[in-house]
Image: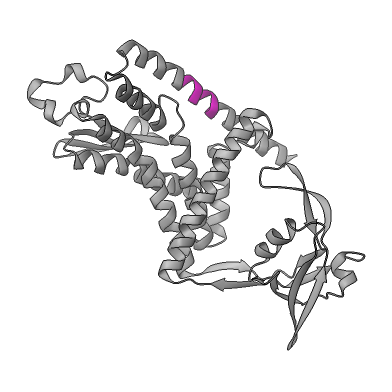
Amino acid sequence: MTAIVSFIVVIGVLILIHELGHFLVAKRFGVKIEKFSIGFGPKIFSKTVGETEYRLSWIPLGGYVKMLGESDPEKVAPEDLPRSFSSLSVSRRMAIASAGPVANFFLAILLFATVFWTGLPVMEAVVGQVLPGSPAAAAGMMKGDRILSVNRQPVTRWDDLRRIIEHQGGREVRLSVQRGDKTLPFLIVPRIQPGKNLFGEVVQQGKIGVGPLGSFVTLRYGFSEGLGLAVIKSWRIATINVLSLGKMITGDISPKNLGGPILIAQMSAKAAESGLSNLLVFMGFVSVTLGVMNLLPIPVLDGGHLLFLAAEGVMRKPPSIRVRELSMQVGFVILLTIMVYAFYNDIMRVFGSAR
């Protein structure tokens, strides 16, 4: 039940913000909005306010903003042409099409910044285990040592320590360590060992043979610093998404890593159970992913619309209705195939973990 509620909340908020981006920019340009829907399919309920029908529909896997003249510009009455989507310049129509993904990116930045401002629980860089025969053991490191810096780079979080050491395999590093009331220097050469990167690929990484104590501390940042870190985190997640897609296409990583609604529901439930900060971080991650996915050049997505508009801008005329219809059909098949495959992966994960 927690998974279902968490999924509805997470996806509902992200879809609302996405469609609100399209809605607000279209309104700003004077376009008449006929429908604003969260979800697809039959409606659960609807309410017409002014000239727009606001509805909630049964399939919570997306939403849409129906604008006058968007799909059938030839049927717009002459007196309504000034308020139709098709009457706008290409640049303004591109602004409306891109507003949804942009809204998702802004939401992610706000969510991450909120976590940075209010407090981010992080694992401290405190040694909890020293492996026998490891470079750290040979250098004399002990359980309870607090890592202060690596090669004069300040270290607060265990992830910072791991990230720096992984890139220093075979090269001497200087650690500053607090032990009790003393600060001790250590010179260690990380051992090169095979490990896995973010994409699950086997790579060579530097290891010194220590494990974390598992203690946590809450870090809080000022307004500007927190906002800057949020922008950086959003950019990194977007980059990882793009690289992951590229590696799936080239076959470098398995498409079995692709997740669907069941995986999102499971992860959102875990994030909700582990605290508000983790839930906000998870929502930010999914929001960036949603923004990136919608920019893919698949006709039924925002990226597909942008592709058509770019073609119109170059050719000085829109693609024919026949071309657009065929492209939309192909795009729908592609998107449906991806969704079915992601759903299949989800089911296999559930049955695989139940064995």
Quarter of the view holding residue 252: top right
Find residue 315 and report its horizontal and vertical position in percent: 31, 19
**Residue 192 shown left or right of residue 259 in the figure:** right
Find residue 81 and report its horizontal and vertical position in percent: 13, 25
The quadrant of the rendering that contains the C terminus is top right
**Residue at the right extreme, as displayed:** 133
Residue found 77% across the figure and 81% down from its top? 184
Residue found 55% across the figure and 36% down from its top? 260
In the rendered image, the vertical position of residue 229 relative to residue 266, given as above or below: below
Quarter of the view holding residue 213: bottom right
Question: Can the viewer see residue 145 in this picture?
Answer: yes
Residue found 43% across the figure and 55% down from its top? 109
Q: Nearer the viewer, residue 65 or 159?
A: 159
- Indicate whether residue 326 is drawn in magenta: no
Q: Nearer the viewer, residue 198 or 59?
A: 198
Q: Main structural element of the magenta stretch: helix, strand or loop? A: helix
In the rendered image, the vertical position of residue 158 relative to residue 342, given as above or below: below
Coloration mode: one colour
Question: Can the viewer see residue 44 in this picture?
Answer: no
**Residue 122 shown left or right of residue 6 in the figure:** right
Magenta span covers which residues? Answer: 332-339
In the rendered image, the vertical position of residue 347 relative to residue 211, given as above or below: above
Q: Nearer the viewer, residue 180 or 42?
A: 180
- Indicate whether residue 336 is drawn in magenta: yes
**Residue 56 shown left or right of residue 210 in the figure:** left
**Residue at the left extreme, as displayed:** 79
